[in-house]
Image (cartoon, rainbow, N blue to C red):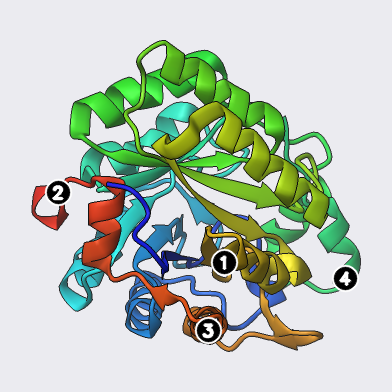
Amino acid sequence: MHQLKNKIIITCAVTGSIHTPTMSKALPVTPAEIAEQSIAAARAGASILHLHARDPENGRPTPDPKVFMQFLPQIKEGCDAVVNLTSGGGARMSLEERLAAPLLASPEMASLNMGTMNFALYPLGARYTKWKYEWEQDYICNSQDNIFRNTFGDIEKIYRQLGEGHGTKFEHECYDVSHLYNLAHFLDRGLFKPPVFLQFVFGVLGGIGADMDNLVFMKRTADRLFGSDCLWSVLAAGRHQMPFCTQAAMMGGNVRVGLEDSLTIGRGQLASSNAEQVKKIRRIVEELSLEVATPQETRQMLGLKGPANVRF
């Protein structure tokens, strides 16, 4: 139940709640598109699929469990990847809304932001003068007051309901060093069970910056706090995605790519799909003489309950 030697877990975050349809034609919106791109990403080498849902009519992020259930069975049927549902949803969603789909679906994994933070998207708005859908401009350009809420009480509630209630393990999304200490606090209290899976997040406005020194510091802090009781992974927003994932792989960590985190495949070039990003990071990982973990190996490393115990 620990990192297998030379095995790298690739997570693919398929659609997220940050980018909007105006920004890329490749961003999956409908349940059919999300299912298709998820299965393709899994076939390309992703062993974990991190999933949000969108209103199929206009692409707006939605917490509606009915929408999730339009693509989750298809993904399970089409590949063996671990399904990791968001418990974050979006900054403007309530905790009850964010938990509705995971509590219904009982996934093997769910994301868990490890603290309350500012979460601003408005710098993206300067790049666009026309928007495909009416909701997009307000959602992006008026996000300067967004606060993503996950208090200690919220985190404990998510753990009690999903972790204890459903046997779901967590992708602990740590947007700053303080989030590592928040997790250590919960482990000291006996909440969450090792091995914990840390996702270091860099480059989101409101969180820690995308500087390599910060990656080294986050890793050093995690080693001190958790020792061998954790596995860690890295995601970085936008153009920082591939450099940070490459560095993480060289340091013995795991990686996360996907159109939630970055819309590009290279400098000034939009990615054509999630699978294209997965193929690129897989090539990099294998050229470093490392191997990509299979879904079965990922379940072994993380101590997951297995696909037979989900509700979709």
Q: Is residue 300 left or right of residue 96?
A: left
From the image, state whether disc 3 or disc 1 is nearer to you: 1
Residue 142: in sight, yes or no?
yes
Q: Residue at x 42, y 58 (%)?
A: 51
**Real-space Cα distance between discs 3 and 4?**
21 Å
Instruction: Name the amino acid, label 2.
Output: Arg
**Real-space Cα distance between discs 1 and 4?**
32 Å
Residue 210: in sight, yes or no?
no
**Real-space Cα distance between discs 4 and 2?**
41 Å
Decide: is 233 above or below 258.
above
Q: Is residue 307 left or right of residue 247?
A: left
Q: Residue at x 30, y 59 (%)?
A: 298
Instruction: Name the amino acid, label 1.
Output: Ala
Mark number displayed over residue 273: 3
Q: Which residue is mark 4?
A: 127
**Real-space Cα distance between discs 3 and 1?**
22 Å
Q: Is residue 94 left or right of residue 309?
A: right
Instruction: Name the amino acid, label 3.
Output: Ser
Decide: is 85 above or below 245.
above
Sequence-first disc among 3 and 4: 4
User: Could you say whether the residue bearing mark 3 is in a helix, strand or loop?
Assistant: loop
For mark 2, does the 10 Å Cα neighbourhood hold few (<14), some (14 to 19), or many (20 or more) residues? Answer: some
Image spot of residue 208 (x, y percent):
77, 42
Q: Which residue is mark 1?
A: 249
Image spot of residue 292 (x, y percent):
39, 74
User: Could you say whether the residue bearing mark 2 is in a helix, strand or loop?
Assistant: loop
